[in-house]
Image (spheres, rainbow, N blue to C red):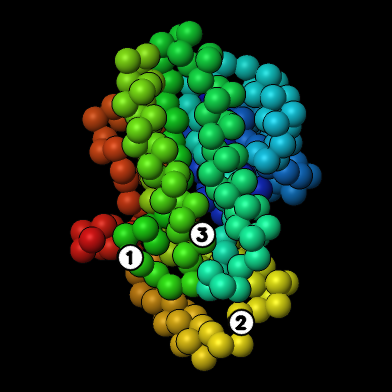
Amino acid sequence: MNTVLITGCSTGFGRDTALHFLNQGWNVVATMRDPAASTLPASDRLRILPLDVTDMSSIAAAVAEAGPVDVLVNNAGVGWLNAVEGTPLETVRAIFETNLFGAIAMMQAVLPGMRARRTGVIVNVSSSSLYKPLPLLSVYRASKAAMNALTESAAHELAPFGIRVRIVMPGMAPSTSFGDTARGQVMKDGGFPAAYADYAQQTLAALMEAANGPVTVGQDVADAVYRAATDPECPAVLPAGADAVAWARDA
C-alpha cells in the first residue's frame, strides 16, 4: 500500500488532501506544527506527526518516523498581503523559509530513499496568483514563483531516477484560513504604509469581489494533487479550481 506524506494538514487544502488520499485507500502521514489541532478522523492508515518545515531537526524526525514515502506533497505555506515597501525584510525571509526553503528541505529529506527505490512523486503546491501580476502579493508571489522554477528544473534532474515532480496551482479559496492569516499578518505588522492606504483598500475590495465569483474549494485541490501523484501522463502544471483554470487559460 502506498504512503503519502503531506505537510500543513491542520486546516485547508492540506487537510482536504489528506482526507482524499485516505478515502482512496492510501497510508497517510499528515504533518502539522501542532498535531493536537488536527480534526482528521481516526484511521489505522493515518499517522499525524509534528513537523515544522523551517526546523531541520523536526524534518529529520518526521521523515524518519514516516518510513518509506512514495509521494511527498509540499503543501505547507504562509500567505502575505502588503506592498513591497511595507514588508519588513525579516518577514520576507520568514515567508521564503516556509514557502520555498521548507519545500526544498523536505525534498532533500525524502529524495535519497526515492532515488534508491527508483520511484516516487513530489507534488509542490504553488499558487494561481502566478498567472496574473496581482498587486500586494509581490513577496508571496515571489516565493511561489521560485518554487515553480525549482520544481520545473528538479523534474528534469529526477526523471532519470524514476521520480516525477509536479506543480499544483490552487485558485482563491475564501473558505480556508489562508486569506485570514495573510490579513492578520498585515495588521500585526502595522498595516499598509500610509502612502498605499487608498490603493490597498481598493485592491482588497476588488479581491473580495472576485471571491464572489467562481472560486476554489478544497476538493479541487485534493483532486489535482491526487491526479499529480497517481497519473504519470498528467501535465507538469495543474491548475486547481474553476478560477485557477480560467486564469491559466487566459494567461
How many residues crowd mark 2 within 10 Å: few (<14), some (14–19), many (20+)? some
Q: Position of residue 192 (x, y in %)?
A: 61, 80
Q: Position of residue 93 (x, y in %)?
A: 63, 52
How many residues crowd mark 3 within 10 Å: few (<14), some (14–19), many (20+)? many
Q: Quadrant of residue 18?
A: top right
Spatial separation of the CA atoms under disc 1 and disc 3: 13 Å
Of the image marks 1 and 2, the number of the one nearer the N terminus: 1
For badge 1, the amino acid type reads: Lys
User: At 43% from the left edge and 21% from the top edge, which residue is drawn?
Assistant: 120
Residue 178 image label: none
Q: Is residue 214 left or right of residue 91?
A: left
Label 3: element kind? helix
Compare residues 32 and 57 and report the one nearer the observer. Answer: 57
Q: Is residue 5 above or below residue 192?
A: above
Spatial separation of the CA atoms under disc 1 and disc 2: 23 Å
Q: Quadrant of the C terminus?
A: bottom left
Compare residues 97 and 211 and report the one nearer the observer. Answer: 97
Residue 140 image label: 3
User: At 31% from the left edge and 43% from the top edge, which residue is drawn?
Assistant: 237
- On the question of residue 248 being in view, the answer is yes
Q: Is residue 197 left or right of residue 212?
A: right
User: At 65% from the left edge and 79% from the top edge, which residue is drawn?
Assistant: 191
Q: Which residue is mark 1?
A: 132
Compare residues 219 and 10 and report the one nearer the observer. Answer: 10
Residue 193 image label: 2
Of the image marks 1 and 3, the number of the one nearer the N terminus: 1
Q: Position of residue 55 (x, y in %)?
A: 72, 36
- Badge 1 vs badge 3, beta-carbon distance below 8 Å: no
Furthest residue in direction top, as rendered: 116
Q: Is residue 177 left or right of residue 122?
A: right
